[in-house]
Amino acid sequence: MNGLIIIVIAAVALIAAYLIYGRYLANKWGIDPKAKTPAYEMEDGVDYVPADTNVVFGHQFASIAGAGPINGPIQAAIFGWVPVLLWVLLGGIFFGAVQDFASMYASVKNKGRSIGYIIERYIGKLGKRLFLLFTWLFSILVVAAFADIVAGTFNGFDAQGQVEANGAVAMTSILFIIFAVALGFFLKYSKFNKAVNTIVAIALLVLSIVIGVNAPIYFSRDFWLLFVFAYVIIACVTPVWALLQPRDYLNSYLLLAMMLAAFVGIIIYNPSMNLPTFTAFKIESGNTVSYLFPSLFVTIACGAVSGFHSLVASGTASKQIKNEKSMLPVSFGAMLLESFLAVIALICVGFAATSSGLPEGTPPQIFASAISTFLTKVGIPENISFTLITLSVSAFALTSLDSVARIGRLAFQEFFTDDSVAPEKQSSVNKILTNKYFATILTLILCFLLAKVGYSSIWPLFGSANQLLSALALIACAVFLKRTHRKGFMLWGPMVVMLGVTFTALVLKIIDLVGTFSAGVQAGNVLQLVFAVLLLILGVIVAAEGIRKLLSKDDTSDDNNAPETAAV
């Protein structure tokens, strides 16, 4: 098998899934093109901001992709390329895309509220509070892992001296942020059409790349880690129109261009797959033992299904949807595109593998090196394409950072918010805890401490928590569909599978972390153990509450969310 055949199979399967299964779900649940969406109904200029479909799609795709669909499949390739490909395609279509669409759909039908609100309304207040705490802890894991990845791609030095590609990536990324703010004001206050806005965005994108490549800057990883957290603090409290929307809009063009270049490179180069089709159910590496179940699923993570997506879909993107018809491409479509990226990552590691196993280097390095090799066939110098691909990977992770930090901040605030008490009558302590600046700084301090452990140590715990979050989101959406007389059977299978995968993975991770204490107690491992135990306990309680509601014969319905009949 070669890369050309694999990518063609993947493209056909994912396109067919969107046209057939995606539209089936939309018709089954009901889409009302004439309904007033929360973006208009609740418009506040900060979180609820109507945006064109392409802008929201850019935000959703750039936020959910992150480094997951690149890191996950490359790390999971130790089991062989066939298990990875099967899970990316089947998981992406029947698990991930369904979860993302259901989460956004339930949110839009409930005034753009988060999955936490959906749990409160349809499952109960206890479930909501525990879910918010779970979300907060999970957000800390994501920010810590992705911040470490971004700081690594910005790091201007290695053992040999300056790294020009990383310096260029760092400079370009800074310009992205500056130009994004300028673009945000332009999009908000100008009256130009989509074509003009697109031309301006692409021009700024190209300008930042040209300047970045020709004027690289060099600082250490520790400096960049501090810079990343300083940026996230600002981005976390800035109105979405001023930074989040335009920055994701800019990045989406870069990311799509990267994927198109990778696709063309694979078609022309037709790389061989040097990975075995399947290695073993049990893999031993030093003191680490990995089993196909559940390791394959939690390692691939975002490339197939990710609970984080439900937070983005219901936490930010749903508040920007102009028309209900946009939900299918923005949620279902973005997830399938992410699965396609995961397939590209698999082909890259398959090509770069040797007879001794996976290639040396971090997943982003493996990915960028393989793509830049493919693109030499079309006459693009390897050093230039390597820099641009590295930039794209860094943009993925950086884009996810401020989105998930904002979600974590909102979850923390919502946890301490008492809706039964008027804001002006809240206690002084409660006012501090619900203050967005306090919530942001506290959250990011914990993220910074955990980031010191390094992404490779955090990733298994992140993957387990991520998949468990997906199971909880599926439960919440299944209860919502039941209570509003919509068909939800397509969520039951994925829900059961993900519960089995994640509870097994968390228990194994806890056992592994306890085992590390025999060699000495380390602060990073202690923090991970605390997180793992809390996530497991919270997950079990929330899942039990949700399943009890799902299986109950309570016929209480919500007529305000009765399904609409509409063609898509």
Image: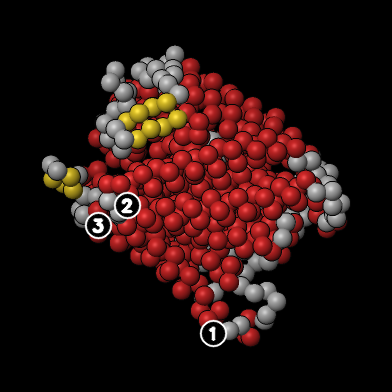
Q: What residue is at 64 percent from the left and 27 percent from the top?
A: 16
Q: Which residue is mark 1?
A: 428
Cα distance in 3D space between marks 3 and 2: 13 Å
Horizontal placement of 263 versus 43: left or right? left
x, y percent for residue 470: 59, 45
Task: Work out which residue is located at the far left of the displayed protein and give it.
Answer: 160
In the figure, is residue 443 to the left or right of 111?
left
**Residue ID for mark 2:** 453
Tell me the SS state at disc 1: helix
Find the distance from the CA under tag 3 to the CA under tag 1.
36 Å
Q: Residue at x 59, y 68 (%)?
A: 414
- Three-letter amino acid code of the residue under disc 2: Val
Direction from residue 276 to residue 50 in the image, left or right: right
Q: Earlier in the sequence, mark 3 or mark 2?
A: 3
In the rendered image, residue 186, in percent from the top left (x then y), is placed at: 49, 62
Please rate how many residues cluster around mark 1, counting C-alpha atoms within 10 Å: few if below 14, some from 14 to 19, many from 20. few
